[in-house]
Amino acid sequence: MSTAADRYVDAYRAEKPAGDPWLTERREAAIARFAELGFPTLRTEAWKYTNVAPLTRTAFTPARPAQVTREAVAPFLIDGCRHVVLTNGRLAPELSNFAVAPLSWAERDLIGDNIGSFAALNTALMPDAAVLRLADGAMVQVLHVAAPGGTELFNPRVIVIADVNASATLVESYVGSGVYWTNAVTTILAGQGAQLTHVKLQDEALQGFHTGACRVEIARDAHYRSLVLSSGARLARNEISAALIGEGAQCNLDGIALVAAGQHADATTLLDHRVPHGTSRECYKSVVDDDGRSVFQGSILVGHDAQKTDARQMHRALLLSPQAHADAKPELRIFADDVKCAHGATVGDLDAESLFYLRSRGVDLETARGLLIEAFVTELFEPIAAPAIRAALDARLHRWLA
């Protein structure tokens, strides 16, 4: 009996993506893994709150190259950043001004993470991979542009290596139009002592779908800070798996989901403390309007050897209508005995007293609601130091509020 996964296995066999022998070997293992797992269902524990049936009902085809002009991408570029542009999952050197290294044998171990079904599909069908090496002071935006010629599937792969002791900033932006599926994988290595800020702006077309997985390894005394702003796509899932592999490593995972009518936004995270003296902080917020739905699944894992770990996690959801829905599943799995760990979750609507105060000062209801939502969200923008990136975050929030 044919399944939804079979069409992509058949597409892989017909496509025969190019690559060196080691890459072909990994592609073969990946497509076999995807064929074994298939599409996740609501019976799959990690997907119990997110139904991917709409993905299975649409016959997406592997994306073809697209011709995108400089004028078309210009509105999405952030001032002060160097730029790497991918169109339909493929690197567009003519639109980029940051040197990207080709995928080589040296990165072979970074292409083998095919545990998840969609990550495996990405490895099998990715047209190429953009390898970025960030030196001290680097500020780079990777812009993913979807320009489908039909109902197409994009499989962009980005590998980022932050140099030892480098202080750098990475922005990933996703934009597009039409009905399509972006299935992205990003792998990040934060070298010893590196300070890496990573901002993801998921602003896909509202008819589109987005599944994104980010795997991070944080070395000794390095600090990785992530902020995900998810506001686009009919169905979006942002996964982050961050492993603290060196003593003294720090990790901050922050996220905001702006969810309107007909949208579903899923944030699933894993903070994996493997060694002593690691510190992590996680705060995810969602603002849900109309009949939208947000999901937060956050897991903190503290291994047997990860003594002196300090980990805290919080999720807060703001529901703007009686039909809005938010699910939260915070989780601690602790196997060490000398740790400080905590988690929590809250769900509520706009604070009535604050709303009354603003109205009593002559502020109309719509403006008052907007001010309270803005205050709720922008608290997580504060650690972003670069003014141009902060402005891009503010602009996206204000468009959503409008």
Image (spheres, rainbow, N blue to C red):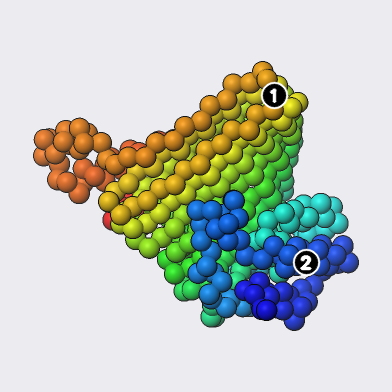
Rendered location of residue 88, percent (x, y): 60, 70
Query: Which residue shows up at 47% across the image and 49% down it?
Result: 295
Q: Is residue 217 left or right of residue 200?
A: right
Going by the picture, which residue comes out furthest to the top? 338
Query: Which residue shows up at 85% across the image and 65% down it?
Result: 25
Query: Which residue shows up at 53% across the image and 76% down it?
Result: 58
Residue 259 position by quadrant = bottom left
Query: Which residue shows up at 58% across the image and 28% down it?
Result: 311
Rendered location of residue 31, percent (x, y): 75, 67
Q: Is residue 25 left or right of residue 37?
A: right
Residue 71 lies, with reference to residue 268, above or below; the image says below
Residue 241 lies, with reference to residue 206, above or below; the image says above
Residue kind at label 2, given as amino acid type = Ala
In-front residue for pair 104/56: 56
Q: Residues within 10 Å of mark 2 (few under 14, many from 20)?
A: some
Rendered location of residue 277, percent (x, y): 68, 22
In-front residue for pair 66/353: 353
In-front residue for pair 96/27: 27
User: Gap between marks 1 and 2, in whole Å?
Assistant: 36 Å
Q: Quadrant of the N terminus?
A: bottom right
Q: Is residue 185 left or right of residue 236?
A: right
Residue kind at label 1, given as amino acid type = Ala
Q: Residues within 10 Å of mark 1 (few under 14, many from 20)?
A: some
Q: Quadrant of the C terminus?
A: bottom left
- Residue assigned mark 2: 32
Question: Can residue 153 be seen in the rendering of this structure?
Answer: yes
Tell me the number on the disc at residue 115.
none
**Judging from the image, what secondary structure is the residue with disc 2 in?**
helix
In-front residue for pair 73/396: 396
**Judging from the image, what secondary structure is the residue with disc 1 in?**
loop
Rendered location of residue 183, percent (x, y): 60, 63
- Residue assigned mark 1: 336
